Amino acid sequence: MPDAIELLSTRSSCKAVALTAPDPSAAEIEKLLTIACRVPDHGKLAPWRFILFEGEARLAAGAAIAAAFRAKYPDAQAEQVAFEGRRLAHAPLVIAVVSRAAPHVKIPEWEQVLSAGAAAMNLVLAAHAFGYSANWITGWYAYDRGVLDALGLEPHERMAGFIHIGTPSGPVQDRPRPALNDIATRFTG
């Protein structure tokens, strides 16, 4: 495994369609999820949960996505509907990170949402540490209530993202990163 600085310096996303087997073993998945939970969580609320999509379950979830797409776009071509049905079938493993943020007497919902985002990022980093690649995707279906209901989300839950995990089928191309001078300032009072 790479050291922490090397890991953080080299992580980049691989397109979901370029992810293939092998994917994490059951023991590795357990470790990935354990690491995903090691995030700031003010109030110890665990304001997130995970849904795993493997094997044929990826296509079953895709059927819900395709049905919602068909309902939104009744004139869509069959190829478009089929494409939507494969949204979760590209990578061999997809883990949905669900935000369970809710009103709380002491903990702002925003902090809970950020915690869910941190859990998703930890999952992406852990996959990289294990030698896999990942891609954090939302897409229209992450915001469609019909899809969320079909995937078992409660009415107050929201999708933080779908983390697609597998082995890259080729070299992963890094994207340009912003210049630090463009995004970092020092407060001078």
Image (spheres, helix red, strand yellow):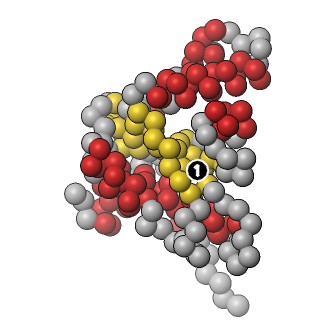
Query: Considering only vertical position in the picture, is 147 above or below 5?
Result: above
Spot occupied by residue 184 in the image (x, y as percentages of width and height): 59, 71
- Name the residue rendered at 58%, 22% in the picture: 63
Name which quarter of the figure residue 140 lies in. top right
Tell me the residue at 39%/40% (across/down): 165
Query: Going by the image, does 58 lie left or right of 152?
Result: left
* Foreground pick, 77 / 5: 77
Query: Which residue corresponds to the image point at 56% horizontal and 57% vertical from the top-left?
Result: 48
Residue 136 appearing in the image: no
Please state if 110 lies on the left or on the right of 98 as rendered: right
Residue that lies at the very extreme toward the top in this rendered image = 78
Quarter holding the C terminus is bottom right
Position of residue 160 measured from the top left corner of the image (x, y, whole percent): 60, 50
Residue with the most extreme left position: 1
Q: Amino acid at mark 1?
A: Val
Q: Residue at x 57, y 46 (%)?
A: 161
Q: Residues within 10 Å of mark 1 (few under 14, many from 20)?
A: many
Callout 1 secondary element: strand
- Nearest the camera: 130 or 55? 55
- In depth, the one of 82 and 42 nearer the eye is 42
Q: Position of residue 70 (x, y in %)?
A: 71, 18
Question: Is residue 13 placed above or below 126 in the rendered structure?
Answer: above
Q: Which residue is mark 1?
A: 98
Pick out the residue farthest to the bottom: 189
The residue lying toward the viewer, choosing from 36 and 124, is: 36
